[in-house]
């Protein structure tokens, strides 16, 4: 049995389409989608329409889908933050049916794998969120290390596996009672074993941040009690996607965020952390409370970071 693991599409339908075509060619039997399908790129309805039609698929919410319920209840007259403009644009673009589909998705799922094995998926494990950002699972830490001394994906996996083996705060994972744990959220592709548990993150299909712009996903291979992971990367037309930011209207609605996204699409680097750090410093100098940042602060940070000239 082959299960395709896909996460963090972020409105990037061309990447999703390429990944699904590749998975079909490889004869996968089913799919697990680990959240964050919308915002950031200009195809929220196309991505959601495709999800709604997927056969043999387990689909859970990410934190992005979790924002929709709050946005639905908010007074739209208060939607004036440039920092959040891409979210406003996406919410308004989503059809009512697609918005409801995404809001109704479960936050977690368990999938039987046979022979008493099971797969547990959740977008991120809240209990570990603070701890994992201190490991190589952090995209900002990954970028800083890569800039200091470039390394390979194999180097990354080896160091990550060594690091997690030493972390006592991961030793409770067997409580999940699953043979395989699948998460997303970090935008980095990795997998490791911790005791009898195989933990897999297929990376961000639509917005990878591991310095490889090809769209990542993973395939879980199951033969009896043997479970293994195949990591894959798929090319797609990034230039056409970038042009779609202009033609769709998301660039006009959210020029700074759209520019950040397009820069990250080509570089596959976490350019977001530096932007938020700069905005936070500017806000502190002004005595502002911080995120969401005032529009002046947000745009000043964009100029300082060279996002907008």
Image: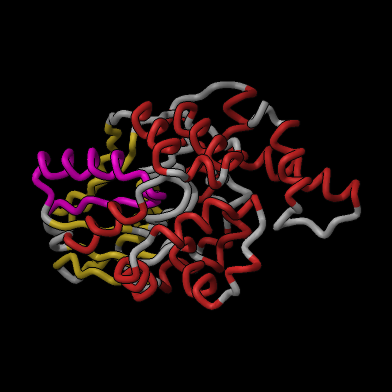
The spot of residue 227 in percent (x, y) is: 22, 52
The front one of 252 and 307 is: 252
Q: Where does the N terminus fall, quadrant-wise?
A: bottom left
**Whether residue 189 is situated above or below residue 106 in the rendered picture:** above
**Whether residue 149 is situated above or below residue 279 in the rendered picture:** above
Q: Is residue 41 left or right of residue 276?
A: left
Q: Quadrant of residue 104?
A: bottom left
**Whether residue 9 is situated above or below residue 151 in the rendered picture:** below
The spot of residue 144 in percent (x, y) is: 64, 32
Whether residue 3 appears in magenta in the rendering, the answer is: yes
Residue located 54% across and 74% down the image: 70
The front one of 293 and 224 is: 293
Q: What residue range appears in magenta?
A: 1-28
Q: Is residue 68 left or right of residue 148?
A: left
Residue located 23% across and 43% down the image: 17
The spot of residue 15 in percent (x, y) is: 30, 39
Q: Quadrant of residue 199?
A: bottom left
Whether residue 93 appears in magenta in the rendering, the answer is: no
Q: Is residue 222 visible?
A: yes
The spot of residue 36 in percent (x, y) is: 41, 57
Residue located 29% across and 59% down the image: 48
**Whether residue 201 is situated above or below residue 145 in the rendered picture:** below
């Amino acid at each position: 049995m082959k299960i395709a693991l896909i996460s963090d599409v972020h409105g990037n339908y061309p990447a999703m389409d390429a990944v699904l075509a590749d998975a079909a060619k490889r004869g996968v039997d089913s799919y697990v989608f680990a959240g964050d399908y919308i915002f950031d790129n200009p195809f929220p309805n196309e991505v959601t329409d495709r999800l709604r039609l997927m056969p043999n698929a387990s689909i859970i919410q990410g934190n992005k889908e979790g924002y929709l319920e709050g946005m639905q209840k908010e007074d739209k007259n208060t939607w004036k933050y440039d920092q959040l403009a891409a979210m406003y644009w996406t919410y308004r673009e989503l059809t009512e049916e697609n918005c409801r589909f995404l809001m109704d998705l479960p936050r977690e799922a368990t999938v039987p794998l046979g022979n008493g094995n099971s797969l547990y998926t959740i977008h991120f494990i809240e209990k570990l969120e603070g701890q994992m950002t201190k490991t190589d699972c952090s995209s900002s830490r990954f970028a800083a290390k890569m800039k200091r001394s470039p390394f390979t994906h194999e180097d990354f996996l080896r160091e990550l596996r060594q690091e997690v083996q030493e972390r006592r705060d991961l030793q409770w994972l067997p409580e999940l009672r699953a043979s395989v744990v699948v998460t997303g959220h970090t935008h980095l592709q990795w997998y490791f074993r911790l005791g009898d548990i195989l933990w897999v993150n297929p990376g961000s299909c639509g917005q990878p941040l591991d310095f490889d712009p090809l769209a990542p996903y993973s395939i879980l291979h199951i033969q009896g009690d043997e479970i293994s992971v195949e990591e894959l990367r798929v090319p797609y037309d990034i230039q056409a996607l970038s042009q779609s930011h202009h033609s769709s209207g998301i660039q006009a609605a959210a020029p700074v965020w759209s520019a950040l996204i397009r820069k990250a699409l080509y570089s596959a680097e976490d350019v977001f952390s530096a932007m938020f750090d700069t905005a936070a410093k500017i806000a502190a100098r002004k005595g502002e409370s911080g995120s969401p940042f005032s529009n002046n602060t947000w745009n000043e940070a964009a100029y300082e970071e060279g996002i907008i000239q």
